Image: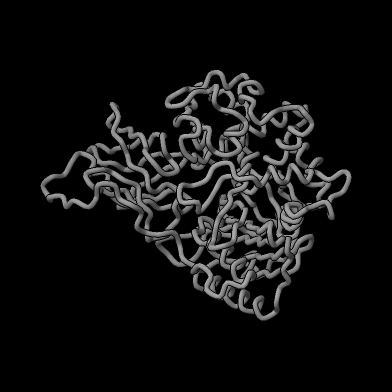
Amino acid sequence: MTVFSFHDDVLADIETELEQLVVDERLPGLSVGLVLDQELAWFKGLGTRDLATGEPADQHTLHRVASITKTLTTAAVLQLRDRGLLALDDQLERHLPEFAGVREVAGRRDQVTLLRLLTHRAGLVTETPLPTWSTDEFPSREEILAALPQTEIVLPADHAFKYSNLAFGLLGEVVARVAGQDYFEYVTEHLLVPLGMTGSVYWLPEDERHRMAVGYSPDLFRDGLKPAPYVSLGGVAACGQLHSSVAALARWLSLQFRTGDHAMPDDVLSTNTLDDFHQPRYSEPDWSAAQCLGWRSLRVGENVYHGHGGGIFGFASQVLFSRQHRIGAIVLANLWPYPMIQAATVRILERLLGNQAPPPLAPPALNPSREDSSRPVAADSRNESDDRAGLYLAEPGVPVHLAIRGERLQLEISPLWPYPLHTGGILEPTENPLAFRIRGGRGAGEMAVFEIDERDVATGFTLGGFVYRRMM
């Protein structure tokens, strides 16, 4: 493997570009770290950690890193596998008998294995059916387990990539039961402490909040940003509850580059297990990306990166690294939703690897493919779904357009704020006129359930734990 050095002129260009990004995107702050093999080789705090004080972030400032947590949960599962306490092909029900009550809508529970949960191929719903993203606190572990009889498997196993926060929440419960130890204590003892990820915590006491950046939500209709609520992930904390910093995450990325030269006798993951950690398990049809255990791999030209992003109230995060070159980038923003954080991270690494024309800093495409939308439709051919078309908004700032395309109701990304959370799916009618089964996209297989007013006009809908309110 080749280790690259960072050139000062390239770093200066990257810093200038990031400074402009903070201005152009009205970001409160951006914390960026570059990892070179076993060290944090460069850090820059741009903007501010707190709009009220203007104080800049440093490399130890805590952010909520959301779904990056999933990669540590994966490592915990691999450690237990290496100890012979479980196998990746184990059925979830073997370790979680409560799962026997789950609803088999379009998949079978005996095909829900730990491996498929780790790779988002189990067909499990994104969230527990209990209120989540629209509440002050996610349901507890006990409540989530009690709700398994109302929880659905909505796609056949291996049918498609189906992102699931619930899957990793349940994997955290498996870690606890197999290890005979609280999940958070296990990860702290077996990962955070050995790696020197000091300061990283799952639960932050109120008197420790000063260590954190202040998280903000966008106001899509006014200037200015709103302080984001602090919402605990409760019983699915293993999917995204971690608080960490650039300095600590640098230690996590450095582990990914460990070889025989760097490994210690008591290393947390063996070289062979790291290879397994990074091995692609499912590839997209165009080979542009693949799903590994926990990690997502991404191809950009001749370079292949592994990484994970995250988004939670007030905070967006992205880590991305090249095993071949032993370099990585950590980008943490104290704003969520923020649609361009992955694009910015890719661009940084491409610049470091000598790409003179890296992918542009652009949000996701605004024009997803529209099935059967090429044929014009007469104005008088409206169907009963037309009155649901319009702009909808979910807190803390996730817009989506519902549009009629080819006589079908479809979720589309909004140019108002192009965050592609629930986009690309088609709403298929069911026997319930208020309920639609989603085909395609993140919500595939799940139900969008509408609310209507006294005039029978749609005022909003729920999907994947989010409550979307109609704006127009």
* Residue 331, x across and y down, in percent: 63, 61
Q: Which of 12 and 20 is in front in this view?
A: 12
Residue found at x 68% / y 70%: 44
Observer-nearest residue: 143 or 97?
97
Instruction: Report x, y in % for residue 131.
Output: 50, 35
The x and y percentages for residue 19 are 59, 75
Specify whether 17 is left or right of 212.
left
Colour scheme of the rendered structure = one colour
Which residue is located at x 64 percent, y 52 percent? 64
Where is residue 114 shown, x and y percent of the image? Answer: 62, 31
Q: Does residue 405 sit above or below 222 in this rendering?
A: above
Q: Residue at x 58, y 49 (%)?
A: 296
The correct choice, above or below, for 42 with respect to 163 in the image is below
Residue farthest along the bottom direction in this orientation:
9
Q: Quadrant of residue 29?
A: bottom right
Position of 316 with respect to 360 (left or right) is right
Judge by depth and name the residue closer to the eye, 316 or 114. Answer: 114
Q: Position of 436 compared to 441: left or right?
A: left
Given the current orientation, which residue lies at the most extreme right position? 265
